[in-house]
Amino acid sequence: MLTLIVGGFFGDEGKGKIAGYIALSKNYKYAVRTGSINAGHTVVYNGREYKLRTISAGFVNKATKLLIPPGALIRLDVFFHELRELNVEDRVFVDYNTGVITEEHVNRERGDSILKSIGSTAQGVGAAMADRVLRRLKLARDYPALAKFLTDVPLLINNALDRGDGVLVEGTQGTFLSLYHGTYPYVTSRDTTASGILSELGVGPRRVDHVVVVFKSYVTRVGEGPLEGELPASEVEKMGLAERGTVTGRLRRVAPFNFELAERSLMLNSATLIAITKIDALFREARHVRKWEDLPRDARAWVEEVESRLNKPVVLIGTGEELEDVVDRSRDLGVEL
C-alpha cells in the first residue's frame, strides 16, 4: 500500500496532522517526507506541539521508519535538531542523493531582490535547487556526518511495496505553489503535485494506491501572489481564522473555500480521496468531535456538499489541533487506508 498526501491549495492545509493520524492509526511501516525546510508541518500529539521541517509527521508511530528521499533538500543543523527533539535517530534513513543546503545558499537568497519581491522564505532552498540543476550541489553522500543514515531510499520503498508493506508519503507545500502548475512566479522551486512528489521518491505512478488531497475548510496563503476572494485582516480576526506560518511566522492571508481551485487540484493530482482540516474553525460545535454522527448537522451538510461538488469521498475530517481530533470515515466509506 502506497498512500500519497498532497496539499490542495497553497500549503498550510494540515498535511502534517493528516500524515501523523494515518501513520498512527493505520500502522504504516515507512513514512517519507519530501520537499525541504522552507515548509513546516505542525503536529500536536499528547498535548505537545512539534514543528517539523525535515522529518515526516509519521514519527508519532514508534514502529514507523522515517525516510528522506533523493529529491529532498536538508540542512544539517535543522536535521540534527529534529533528530534530537524527536528522539528518532535509530529509525531515520537518508538517501545517498538527498541534496544539502548550506549557509552560502541562505546568504545568496537573502541578497536576491527578486526572491524578496515574491515573498521567498529565504531558507536557501531555491539557491540549492539551482545548484542542483547546474550539477554543483553537494549531496548527503558527501557529508561524513550523515554516513550512518545513508541508504538507497527508492530501492527500500520499492522492495517494501513488493512485500506488501505500507508506505506513507507526505508531500510538501500545496498544489498551487508548484513551479509548473502554480501561480508563477509566486511559487516554490519544485513541483509540489503528486507527479513531482513521486519523482522525488523514485517510485512510478502505477505503484500508488491512494492520493489523498488535503484541503483546509478555508484557503490560506503566506507571502505574495494572487488569492481570489481574499478577506480583509479585520474580518479574518473577527472570524477567528488568523494564523501564522510555521517557518516564517508571517500572518497568513485568508479566503473562503474555493471550489474551482479544489476541482483543478483534484485533476492535477489524480486524487482518489479528500481530507478536510479545521472544520471546527467554521463550525465551532465540531471542535474535538471524533464521530461523524456527533458532528453538527450544518458541518455534515457542508462536507456532503464538498463531496457532491468535487465527486470524491471526504475520508478524514480534522476537528481540532490534537492529532487524534479526526473524524475517520474510511471504514464507513469502504476505503482501505
Image (tube, rainbow, N blue to C red):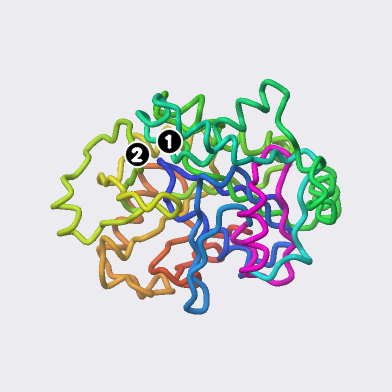
Q: Nearer the viewer, residue 218 or 117?
A: 117
- For the C terminus, which image quadrant? bottom right
In which image quadrant can residue 119 be found? top left
**Measured Cα–Cα span from mark 1 to mark 2:** 7 Å
Q: Residues within 10 Å of mark 1 (few under 14, many from 20)?
A: many
The amino acid type, in three-letter code, at marker 2 is Gly
x and y percentages locating residue 66 in the rendered image = 71, 58
The amino acid type, in three-letter code, at marker 1 is Ser
Residue 208 colored magenta?
Answer: no
In which image quadrant can residue 35 be found? top right
> Do labels 1 and 2 touch, CB within 8 Å?
yes
Look at the image and give the residue range highlighted in magenta. Answer: 56-85
Rendered residue at 61%/52% (across/down): 54
Q: Residue furthest bottom?
A: 46
Query: Is 212 positioned to the left or the right of 337 in the image?
Result: left
Rendered residue at 25%/46% (across/down): 256
x and y percentages locating residue 8 in the rendered image = 45, 43
Query: Is 61 positioned to the left or the right of 105 in the image?
Result: right
Q: Nearer the viewer, residue 128 or 217?
A: 128
Q: Residues within 10 Å of mark 2 (few under 14, many from 20)?
A: some
x and y percentages locating residue 130 in the rendered image = 60, 25
Query: Is 150 positioned to the left or the right of 323 in the image?
Result: right
Rendered residue at 22%/40% (across/down): 230
Question: What residue did someone put label 2 on?
Answer: 223
Q: Nearer the viewer, residue 101 or 54?
A: 101
Q: Vertical placement of 330 versus 33: above or below?
A: below
Q: Which mark is residue 333?
A: none
Question: What residue did someone put label 1 on?
Answer: 120
Rendered residue at 46%/68% (across/down): 326
What element does badge 2 sit on? loop
